[in-house]
Each structure stands twice: as structure tokens, then as C-alpha cells.
Amino acid sequence: MWAREDAYSQTEHALDFGIKTYKYFTEYFATPDVVPKADHVAVPDFLAGAMENWGLVIYRETSLLYDKQVSSSHDKFTVTLIVAHEIAHTWFGNMVTMEWWDDLWLNEGFASLLMYLAMDHVYPTWNVFALQVVDLLSTMVKDALTTSHPVSSHIIDPDEIPQHFDSISYSKGMAILRMITGFAGADNFRDGIRRYVQKYKFKNARMSQLWDTLTESFNNTFDVARIMESWTCQMGYPLVTIEEGDGHFILHQTRFLLDQDIKKEHETNASAEYKWNIPFTYVTQRQSHKPKTVWLNFTSATIHEPNDKWILGNYEFIGYYKVMYSSQMWSLLAKQLLEDHTVFPEANRAVLIGDAFAFARANVLDYNVALNLTRYLSKEQSSIPWESFLHSIEFLKGMISYNAAYTQLQQYLKKLVAPVFEMVGTADKGELPEKYLRRVILSLACDVGVDKAVEYAKSMFANWMKHDARLPPDLSMVIYSVGIREGDSTEWDYVWNKKLSTTVASEENIMMESLVYTQKPSLLWRYIKWLLDPSKIKPQDVRVVIGYFSKTPLSRMVAVQFVMSQWDDLIAKFSNDQFILRDIIQEVTAFVNTEFNLEQFERIFAKNTPKVASKSVENALALIRANIGWMKTNYEKITTWLEHEKY
């Protein structure tokens, strides 16, 4: 491990975990790494998160360094995840490499799956496969747009390559590979991957060769190519609708799209009909811990179970699809959550909420149904459903943040979070899942104005400023942000100067994020203009900081105006880094929902957009149009529900 001399002690965690991970993968693949040594280097200014050069892996500092006195459990999780991902590339990416960029996802999807396997092996109490649910639900939002792309995409122009280093290749690639472990079994999957690596070691391989190897390894029990081509060669994913029949359930499939108007246009074109080979897993109320599987082989299927009680699809979220229930079934599931939510696994509680809000956003489910599911959260003590809810509600908050209903929504959130805050408190203790929950709950409690939470954060910030007192690592971000929000330029400048003096990269990032919570527009404008000044914000941090500006209504407003007024300057500055332009476009336009702003962005993008950002622009404009339609359809419904919930 290599790092700056004054930061070298922060490599201890990565070194300890890295040794265990090399050992784990050596046993998993039954093939050792062939290079005599592997150097892992933390670089102070590095644009990528990390790069898996064989024998010399390079990281930005936040991806490799961890200081247990300052860094949070989330920082530890991030370092662990990225180190595992880069080491996994030793076998998938380096030892065996895809033949062409069409199958980039083989490198990144496999490394993403393998990193979770290694983390689960070393830290079984972290429940890592449940923790990845929220990221995967976010990927499914992008994959529900017509501007998405298949996991395996035909690439001709080299300029297209960087645009495919996205969540479709990474997260969706991981998800569909994990689905194979679900229907074939984890041990069978491992044996097949061992055979593949040994067969194509030091060679280039195609996706079809992977499927053939797995089919052979599974003794032809599954025709893997036939199953998986529907998941890799067409974009999007299926919506499985469960319909109650006469003493049984009938499953139907269709492609899920966020914009249902576009879906109707596609349905008029027979060539645009999407079908999948779906291993549908489920449990029933009568046998809530005995999952079963039924296959939808490009068509419908029947489950011969009594339909007078609830059924829960996609058990443990092992499949890359969404499940739609009847109104009666949604009510039964909501009732179960209120009576005893622990009957459902954490992942499924998170997915029920995430899917319901996605369906409501797509106008295929009433927002009342989605919001009714959240009533049980006042008893929820797992961070995973809470994070899914907050991710789902983030869209809703972003849409209505400049309207009267925003205040009503904040009041409802306060009613949900206040009792959980009393249960979890602010003590700095517990394993990673408990610390995650405490951070999530304190953050929300401060955001919606739970007095006890806000006073705690304010007093801790004041004590830190006055006495340089050490803050609880997992709560420091919340404390900084409340101090900045409640203060003025004095507090803002103090945090900025502390950011300049710290030797811990993760602490520097936390401080940079907290600065966007100021309610002083002049400070936000000063901060965002520094994106163009490398003496203030390093090039590697531009993508990170622009993402921070999506955190509050005021910072989002400033970011939109900044991009509109500085678009030509941003292109001149960052045209050689397609990742920065992609993230700027994606982050700034995520909640834009007015015709006026759409016309402005259309004019700006039409006038000047480099080729490397063309896909990002296309996605952004499609999303803005969908946002405009959403406001017209849903704002009044949500206002009515929130009004009723006050009483």
C-alpha cells in the first residue's frame, strides 16, 4: 500500500481487507494471481475512483484511505467495496478480458458482483446484498427510460466507449449475474466461473463463450444463453403483474417504462415488444420463509396457490424485475407491514417502497397506495427500507420543493421519523448497520426540524468550533450541515478552512458536502463558481461537488442557473473529460420540471454539446419532459393525501 507519508497510517484497513480478499478470490477461482506483487496507490488528485492496472492499482484517496478516528462507517464501506472491486478485476478484466467493448459489462458487472461476495465473506454482519438495493433501484430508474441501452451494446465509434461506463454496465450487470446464482445455485455458479477463468486465462473472451461454459458446467440443466440473451441484448427490464385467478395467481409480463405515453407508442410497433425469460421467486403468507420459483418463458405463468392471502414476489430481490400487485394485494401487504414488518426481509421492505413510488411516478399506481405503505416506518429500525424511502421521496421532494405541498410533506416525514429518532438516539456505538440507521435517522430528523435532533447537532457544531472537539465520525456530516445551515459566512469559512487543513480525504469530502447546506445564496454562488477554479476545487472533485448541489432546493436552483449561464465555459474547461460533463448534466437536470427551463436547456444544448456528452443530454431532456408530465398528473393528488394525513 502506498500513500502520502502523513496519510500512510490510513492504509491499514485497506491492507488488512486486501490481504483477505486476495486469499478469498484465490480460493473462489481456484486460481492464484500470477503477478509477483500488487501495489495499491492512493493518489491525491485522480479523476477516476480507481483503476485496476494489473500489479499497480491506482485510487483517489477517498477510495483507499480510512481513518477510524475521523472516517465514518460509510467511508469504511466505500473503501472496502472499491478495494474488493479492483482486486476482483485481477481475474475478470485482467486475467480474462472481454474481446471487445460490446461486453464491457463482463468486466464491470462481474467485478461488481464479486466485490459483494468478498465483502459478505469478510463482513457477514454487514448484510451487503441488502445494502446494495438502493443503488440498484436508482439504476432501474435510468433503465426505465427509452434512452437506456442494453447491457451488451454494439460499439463502433471509440467516442461511444466512455458513455458505457455507467450504472447499466456496473449495477445492472451485477444484478443479472446475481440472478444466475439465484436459479442455478451459488456453488454451481462458482464452479462455472472457475471453469471459465481457467479456460480463457490470458485470453479475450466473448459473452457467448461465458454462457456456453456456464451451460456446460450446469450439465445443460439450464440453457444459459437462451435465458440471459433477453437480459443482455435488450434494454430495460420486465414488470411482472400478479393477477388473482380462481384459486390461483396468473403472472403477466411487460416492459416497464417511466413514461407511459412513450410505452403506448412502442406497443403499436410489434418489433418493439420486449419479453424476458424470468425466474420469478415468491413466498406466500402461508409459507413466508419458503421461497419458490416459477419461470415466465417469454410469456405468462400460473402459480397454483390459494389467493386469499398475500403473495410477495422477487423474494430477497434476487431478480432484476419489478412486481405489480392488485389493489387488494397492496392493501394486504401494507397491513402486514403495519402488523409485523419483520415477516418480510429487509431487502423486500425496501423494494416494496421503492417499486410503489416508481409505479406511482409512472402513473400505473396511485400515489395513495405508495404513501400508505410508508406509514409503518415509524417502527422501522433497519436503515435499508429507510434509505429506499428517502431515495424515493427525494424525487417527490425535488418535484414539489418550490410549492406549498413541500411544507406538508416535511410535516409528514417529521411524524414518521420522530419516534425512530427517540429509539436510536445519538450514541456512537454498534455494528455498521446500526450506525447506518443512526446516521440516516438523525439526518432526516434535522432536515424536517425535530427539535431535539437539531439542538443536538447545533450544540455539537458549536463545541467543535469553540474547542475543536472530536465529532462522532458517523454523525459528523449531519452536524456540519446543520451548523452551516443555521449559520452564516463565519461558519461557512471556518468549515472551508478546516477542509483545507485536514489530512484525511474522507473528512475533506464531508466538509465539502456540508457547505452546500447554507441558506445564503451568495455563499452558494461563490462555491459553485469555484468549480472552474482548480486552485479552489481539484479537477477530481468537480463531479463530486456538482452532485452535492442536488441536496437542497436552494442549491439546486443555483446549480441550474449556473449551468445555463456557464455552459460554454464548462465545455471549454471539461470537454476532454466526458465523465464530468455527464455528471454535471445528470445532477443539475434531475428535478427540472418546467416548460420554461426545458426550452432553455434545449436551446443551450442544441447550440453547443460535444459528442461525448450527447447521450447524457438526450437522457436529461427525456427526463425533464417526464418530470413536466409528472407535475401535471400528480401534484394535486399528493397535496390531497398530505392534507388528509394531517388529521
Image: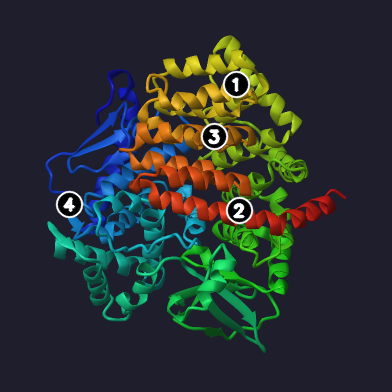
> Which residue ends up furthest to the top in the rendered image?
466
Q: Position of residue 485 (x, y in %)?
A: 64, 25
From the image, tell me which residue sits under label 3: 559
Please name the amino acid that badge 1 sits on. Ser
- Tell me residue 373's x, y (percent): 70, 59
Where disc 4 sits, the SS reads loop
User: Which one is in front, 296 or 14?
Assistant: 296
The residue that label 2 is drawn on is 627
x 54%, y 13%: residue: 468
Q: How dense is the environment of label 1, judged by Cα within 10 Å: few (below 14), some, or many (20 and up)?
A: few
Q: Secondary structure at mark 3?
A: helix
N-term mark: 4 or 3: 4
Q: Is residue 440 above or below residue 1?
A: below
Q: CA distance from mark 1 to mark 2?
A: 28 Å
In this figure, which residue is indicated by the disc labeled 4? 32
Q: Is 104 situated above or below 447?
A: below
How far apart are labels 4 and 1 at the CA level?
56 Å
Q: Amino acid at mark 3?
A: Ala
Query: Please, what secondary structure does the residue beneath circle 2 have?
Result: helix
Residue 102, relative to residue 69: is it above or below? below
**Within 10 Å of the Cα at label 3, are there few (<14), some (14-19), or many (20+) other Cα atoms?**
many
Task: Place residue 442 in its image quadrant.
Answer: top right
